[in-house]
Image (cartoon, rainbow, N blue to C red):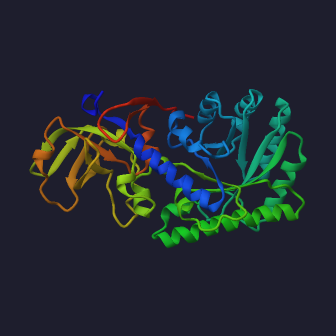
């Protein structure tokens, strides 16, 4: 099958680009002497995840329990559920453990720690937990130096049914950095905060075997990961325009795109209309705060070559409006009605979540495979 035969909109994955992205991060972390715990939330598919595990310790990260169940069903046992645990989910977590999975949850409060211990005792299992650290003021977690860290650690270590697995942090603020130097500084802050908390636990006589850090930007620009036991990253698999805007990759490295059809011309306005609106591209506008706003995505030809100047300027639910970012006239001959374009996403995770499968290519327009995604929670 060729891309020309596919009904649009649909999701295209260039496997050759994906493999280069995986190899680049593997090589970088090998130089830093730390293993990768890849995040399954970007691909949500076992075929895309397997290459990230090659030569690595074997554990993964997930953002939903549905992902955990899916990957466990494909033979992966060591899973970190990296969203602060809600007590209502603990029966489901315990059920996975009873089937043989090693699920580790994260938390940042005494109430969560006690709930985990109580539910684990109820099910007769041991449920390991990582204490989430707020290393950058981005979101959740215990701040370094807060006595709450040791209070939580003591509960996890002493209560029957749970175990203190270590600490985990995510430098989400790296996505807001304005320069590569700022990302390097953020990577150091991320590392320093996690290691300081690990040392505080150990000084209090508590175990801290895992020191987990990670975001795709900091993974690519960290210079010192001493004291860190693993790096978590996810969007590196496909990359996207936010990562390109941060200097982590080039637009040409982005492995995932939305195939869309040109369904109309508004010549007076300088618009070409596609059948891929925000239901296909997502509403993510992550590049709007960067130095170059990429609208709702950059436009490529069917083979994946960038069409200079063209951007999805606006979207409705099922319509995308393509225009030249500088206001120049569109080359209508290059975008005839019925022709196909590929749109590079702002946020690969959000755009891919709009679809149930990838149409896989290997650097050409030939579809070599179809990989199904697991969506939902």
Residue at image point 83% right, 54% down: 153
Which quadrant of the view contains residue 74?
Answer: top right
Horizontally, residue 350 falls left or right of residue 138, namely: left
Horizontally, residue 265 falls left or right of residue 311, namely: left
Horizontally, residue 348 falls left or right of residue 37, namely: left
- Asked whether 80 or 313 is in front, the reply is 80
Q: Is residue 311 above or below residue 70?
A: below
Tell me the quadrant of the picture where the N terminus can be found. Answer: top left
**Where residue 295 sits in the image (x, y, percent)?**
31, 55
- Asked whether 287 or 216 is in front, the reply is 216
Which quadrant of the view contains residue 188?
Answer: bottom right
Q: Is residue 309 above or below residue 278?
A: below
Residue at image point 31% right, 46% down: 343
**Where residue 270 sits in the image (x, y, percent)?**
14, 52
Horizontally, residue 278 falls left or right of residue 98, namely: left
Tell me the quadrant of the picture where the C terminus can be found. Answer: top right
- Asked whether 257 or 274 is in front, the reply is 257
**Where residue 224 sits in the image (x, y, percent)?**
64, 67
- Asked whether 276 or 111 is in front, the reply is 276
Q: Is residue 213 above or below residue 19?
A: below
Residue at image point 33% right, 61% down: 293
**Where residue 376 sits in the image (x, y, percent)?**
53, 33
């Amino acid at each position: 099958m060729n891309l020309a035969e596919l009904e649009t909109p649909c999701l295209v994955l260039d496997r050759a680009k994906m493999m280069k992205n995986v190899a680049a991060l593997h090589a970088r972390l090998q130089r830093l002497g730390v293993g990768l715990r890849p995040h399954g939330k970007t691909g949500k598919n076992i075929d895309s995840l397997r290459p990230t595990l090659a030569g690595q310790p074997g554990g993964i990260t997930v953002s939903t329990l549905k992902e955990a169940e899916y990957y466990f069903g494909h033979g992966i046992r060591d899973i970190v559920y990296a969203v602060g645990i809600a007590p209502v989910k603990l029966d489901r977590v315990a059920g996975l453990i009873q089937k043989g999975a090693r699920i580790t949850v994260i938390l940042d409060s005494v109430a969560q720690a006690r709930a985990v211990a109580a539910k684990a005792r109820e099910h007769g299992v041991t449920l390991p937990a990582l204490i989430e650290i707020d290393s950058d003021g981005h979101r959740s977690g215990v701040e370094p130096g807060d006595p709450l860290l040791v209070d939580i650690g003591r509960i996890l270590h002493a209560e029957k049914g749970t175990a203190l697995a270590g600490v985990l942090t995510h430098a989400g603020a790296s996505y807001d950095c304005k320069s590569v130097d700022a990302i390097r500084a953020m990577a150091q802050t991320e590392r320093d905060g996690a290691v300081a908390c690990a040392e505080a636990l150990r000084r209090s006589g508590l175990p801290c075997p895992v020191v987990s850090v990670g975001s795709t930007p900091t993974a690519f620009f960290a210079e010192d990961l001493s004291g860190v036991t693993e790096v978590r990253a996810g969007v590196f698999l496909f990359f996207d325009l936010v990562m390109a805007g941060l200097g982590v990759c080039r637009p040409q490295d982005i492995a995932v795109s939305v195939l869309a059809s040109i369904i109309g011309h508004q010549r007076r306005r300088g618009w070409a209309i596609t059948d891929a609106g925000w239901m296909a591209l997502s509403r993510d506008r992550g590049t709007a705060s960067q130095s170059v706003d990429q609208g709702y995505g950059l436009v490529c030809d069917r083979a994946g070559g960038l069409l200079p100047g063209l951007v999805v300027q606006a979207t409705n639910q099922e319509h995308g409006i393509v225009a030249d970012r500088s206001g120049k006239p569109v080359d209508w001959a290059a975008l005839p009605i019925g022709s196909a374009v590929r749109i590079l996403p702002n946020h690969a995770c959000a755009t891919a979540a709009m679809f149930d499968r990838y149409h896989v290519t290997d650097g050409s327009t030939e579809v070599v495979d179809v990989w199904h995604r697991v969506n939902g929670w």
